[in-house]
Image (tube, helix red, strand yellow):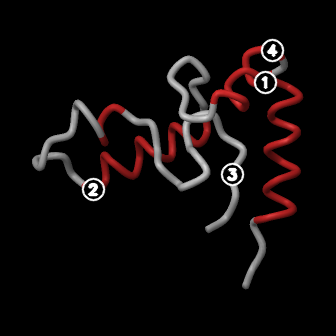
Amino acid sequence: MTKLYHPNIDKLGRICLDILKEKWSPALQIRTVLLSIQALLSAPNPDDFLDADVAEKWKADEKGAKAIARDWTLKYAHEI
């Protein structure tokens, strides 16, 4: 699994997203789920976190956290 530096995704790849938990419904369309994940990836929510360290960094220094996320993308998201 590709490592992500994101406050709403933990080291095991679990995603903190309400429609995947308490707001889940079998009636949800896969399109809605995927768009919600895409939106979360683009706009992290450090107030509803799974990774406390990343969330703390994001709140204290968003620009620095985004730089770390970019570095991790370059380092870990490569073709196998």
Q: CA distance from mark 1 to mark 3?
A: 14 Å
Q: Secondary structure at mark 4?
A: helix
Residue position for label 2: 30
Q: CA distance from mark 2 to mark 4?
A: 34 Å
The answer to whether 73 is drawn above or below residue 42 in the figure is below
Asked whether the beta carbons under mark 2 and mark 4 sit within 8 Å of each other, the answer is no
- Observer-nearest of 34 and 69: 69
N-term-proximal mark, 2 vs 4: 2
In the image, is 62 to the left or to the right of 55? right
Q: Which mark is residue 60?
A: 4
Rendered image quadrant of residue 64: top right
Disc 1 residue type (three-letter): Lys
Residue position for label 3: 4
Q: Secondary structure at mark 3?
A: loop
Residue position for label 1: 57
Q: CA distance from mark 4 to mark 3?
A: 19 Å
Asked whether the beta carbons under mark 2 and mark 3 sit within 8 Å of each other, the answer is no
Q: Position of residue 23 (x, y in %)?
A: 22, 32
Disc 4 residue type (three-letter): Ala
Q: Secondary structure at mark 2?
A: helix
Disc 3 residue type (three-letter): Leu
Q: Position of residue 13 (x, y in %)?
A: 53, 54
Asked whether the beta carbons under mark 4 and mark 1 sit within 8 Å of each other, the answer is yes
